[in-house]
């Protein structure tokens, strides 16, 4: 007899090849459909093994974080999971399956959309094709509390519902800027002659200031810096010591630009299947999680101090060069939103910018 709650295609080991596989369930040559089937099997089997009859009224959510557990942008979500599990006994429980080894970051949006994952901790930069309007989240100049009050959250939630079959439960990262880190000095808002490692978040900004950009996986950044393949990279104020990049980084440019957005998304079908008291509880927990954004100023200062202690010097742009730096970032960012999401760009700017 098949275990209760396990999808039919996971009933026997032969039809669920991931059941006895190594911890990383993703094979590089698999099709997207096969990957989703394998992940469904893994999560269903793990969840069934953990279930008990006493928890019949308690909903258990399968969760994945896009960031390595224990690092800067996973820690708030891990604290959220702990709080939910401590205060939601008999109501809601979250089973945090893992991080990028469970679902690769750029596949996590699809995984939560399809229901392979019930709840995910993920930045909009990892699901740009699913939600082009996500480009606007890095440009937010209002806190998530202000966004909930002025209608921005409602619009973004509606877009997540329609485009991704996801409920936009919470946002963390408010007040945490990105920075340019360098091994060659600059004294103005001009990046000509520099080769920089980029992600889509700030590629257009660096290009607008004259940089030559290259895109490499995070795992190759250290060696690229060490060998002089790149002269620098963009990254938030938090996190580079977690990655060890401080060992091959000489300078950080001030001021920072853009804002980190790390979002907690829930599969919309799962959200609708919950009882009202379960949804209300998770909403209350989400508001608690968002309240922890108030600590980011303190965390950012502590991280800057740690970077200084590690030997990273600060380049501070002032006056007209500072203004050019920030205005270019803003203008290029909103131009990109208008390009990829013309129908909603104007309204998003009204709600998110100051």
Image (cartoon, helix red, strand yellow):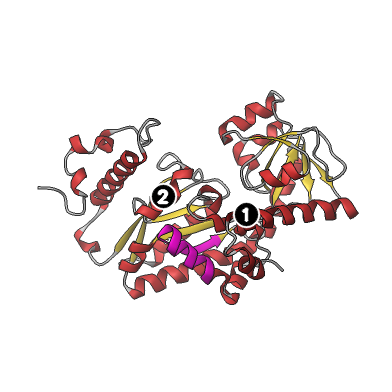
Residue 267 image point, x, y percent = 38, 59
Residue 77 image point, x, y percent = 49, 55
Is residue 175 visible from the viewing direction of this image?
A: yes
Residue nearer the viewer, 211 or 288: 211
Q: Earlier in the sequence, mark 2 or mark 1?
A: 2
Residue pointed to by mark 2: 110
Residue pointed to by mark 1: 339
SS of the residue under disc 2: helix
**Side of 188 where 133 appears, left or right:** left
| Residue at 42 percent of width and 68 percent of height | 282
Q: Main secondary structure of the magenta part?
A: helix
| Residue at 63 percent of width and 70 percent of height | 351
Q: CA distance from mark 2 to mark 1?
A: 23 Å
Which image quarter holds the C terminus?
Answer: bottom right
The stretch of residues the image draws in magenta is: 154-171
As drawn, 263 above or below 64: below
As drawn, 279 above or below 108: below
Residue nearer the viewer, 198 or 119: 198
Residue 144 falls within the magenta-colored stretch: no
Q: Quadrant of residue 171?
A: bottom right
| Residue at 34 percent of width and 54 percent of height | 115
């Amino acid at each position: 007899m098949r275990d209760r709650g396990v999808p039919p295609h996971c009933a026997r080991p032969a039809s669920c090849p991931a059941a006895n596989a190594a911890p990383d369930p993703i094979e590089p040559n698999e099709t997207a459909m096969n990957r989703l089937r394998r992940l469904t099997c893994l999560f269903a089997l793990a969840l069934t093994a953990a279930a008990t009859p006493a928890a019949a009224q308690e909903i258990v959510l399968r969760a994945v974080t896009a960031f390595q557990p224990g690092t800067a942008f996973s820690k708030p979500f891990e604290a959220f999971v702990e709080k939910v599990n401590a205060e939601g006994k008999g109501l809601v429980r979250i089973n945090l399956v893992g991080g990028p080894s469970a679902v690769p970051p750029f596949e996590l949006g699809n995984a939560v959309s399809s229901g392979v994952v019930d709840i995910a901790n993920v930045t909009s930069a990892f699901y740009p094709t699913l939600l082009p309007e996500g480009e606007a989240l890095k440009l937010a100049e209002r806190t998530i509390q202000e966004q909930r009050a002025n209608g921005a959250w409602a619009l973004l939630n509606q877009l997540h519902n329609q485009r991704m079959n996801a409920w936009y439960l919470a946002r963390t990262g408010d007040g945490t800027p990105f920075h340019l880190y360098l091994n060659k000095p600059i004294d103005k808002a001009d990046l000509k002659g520099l080769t920089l490692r980029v992600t889509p978040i700030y590629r257009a900004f660096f290009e607008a200031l004259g940089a030559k950009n290259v895109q490499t996986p995070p795992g190759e950044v250290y060696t690229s810096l060490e060998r002089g393949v790149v002269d620098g990279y963009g990254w938030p104020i938090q996190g580079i010591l977690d990655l060890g990049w401080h060992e091959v980084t000489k300078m950080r440019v001030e001021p920072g630009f853009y804002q980190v957005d790390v979002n907690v998304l829930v599969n919309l079908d799962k959200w609708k299947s919950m009882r009202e008291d379960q949804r209300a509880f998770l909403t209350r927990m989400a508001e608690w999680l968002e309240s922890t954004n108030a600590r980011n100023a303190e965390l950012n200062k502590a991280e800057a101090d740690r970077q200084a202690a590690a030997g990273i010097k600060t380049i501070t742009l002032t006056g007209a060069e500072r203004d050019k730096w920030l205005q270019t970032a803003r203008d290029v960012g909103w131009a990109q939103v208008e390009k990829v999401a013309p129908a909603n760009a104007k309204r998003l700017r009204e709600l998110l910018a100051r």
